[in-house]
Image: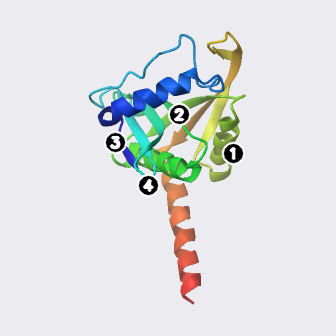
Amino acid sequence: MLEPAFINQTELQKLYSSFISDKKSVYALPFPLRYQLLLEETNLYSIQIVSKNVQNQIIGYIEAQIDRYNNIVENVFMIKFCKDNSYIFTKDTLDFVSELFDTHGFEKIVFQTIIQNPANSIFSRFIKEKKVGRLIGVLKEHRKNIKGKNFDVALYEVYKTSWKRFLNKQETLLHKKNNDLEV
C-alpha cells in the first residue's frame, strides 16, 4: 500500500535513522551522508511515498526526483527497510512506476544504480527481459560511499510506451490464466 511520505514522517525518520546506522547499507549511503530524509510538503520537485505492509507498517521508501519542464523523472531513490515483505515492496514499486506514468503523465524515468548492489541485477534483468527501457551506460567509479569507496554506476531509462506494452502483456497473461482456470 502506498502513502505520501510526508504524512508518515515521524515513523519514516526513525526507520531511516536505523537504516543509516546499519553498516550493511553501504550501497545506499552516499557521501555526504544525510542524517534525515528531506521530505517535501508538495510534489513540485519530487514525489515521495512509503510502502506499507498489511499491518500498516512502513517497509520501504521511494522518491522520484522530477523535472516538470521536460516531463521526465530524473532519478529514483529507494530503500527497503526490512528483509521480508519483498513481494509487497516490489508490487508497490511497480504501482509507483505506473502512477508516475498514468497519474502524473511523465514520459520517461531515468535512474541509476550502483552496479555492485545486488538490487542492480534485478533491475537490469527486469529491464532487459520485459523490454521496458534500456541501459544507457556505465560510469566507472562514479559514486563514493561514506567509507570513501568508489562504485560503478549503471544508468537506465524506462519509457512510458514500453511500460504500457509490458502492462498490457501482463494483463493478457493474467486474463488467459483466469480463463484456463474456468474451463
- Mark 2 belongs to which amino acid? Ile
Comparing 150 with 19, the one in front is: 19
In this picture, residue 103 sits left or right of residue 51? left
Classify 80 as above or below 138: below
Mark 1 and 2 residues: CB-CB less than 8 Å, in contact?
Answer: no
- Mark 4 belongs to which amino acid? Val
Q: State the residue at coordinates (59%, 29%).
A: 112
Residue wearing tag 4: 54
- Mark 1 belongs to which amino acid? Arg
Which mark identifies residue 125? Answer: 1
In three-dimensional space, the C-alpha distance between marks 1 and 2, rounded to whole angstroms, equals 19 Å
In three-dimensional space, the C-alpha distance between marks 2 and 4, rounded to whole angstroms, equals 18 Å
Q: Nearer the viewer, mark 1 or mark 2?
A: 2
Comparing 175 with 162, the one in front is: 175
Q: Locate the C terminus and report the quarter of the image it occupies.
A: bottom right
Give the total of numbered labels.
4
Is tag 1's residue or tag 2's residue first in the polypeptide sequence? 2
Q: State the residue at coordinates (58%, 76%).
A: 177
x and y percent of residue 162 in the render?
53, 49
Classify 170 as above or below 127: below
Residue 65 visible here: no
Residue wearing tag 2: 79
x and y percent of residue 143 in the render?
63, 16
- Mark 3 belongs to which amino acid? His
Residue 31 visible here: yes
Q: Residues within 10 Å of mark 1 (few under 14, many from 20)?
A: few
In this picture, residue 50 sits left or right of residue 138? left
Residue wearing tag 3: 104
Q: Residues within 10 Å of mark 2 (few under 14, many from 20)?
A: some
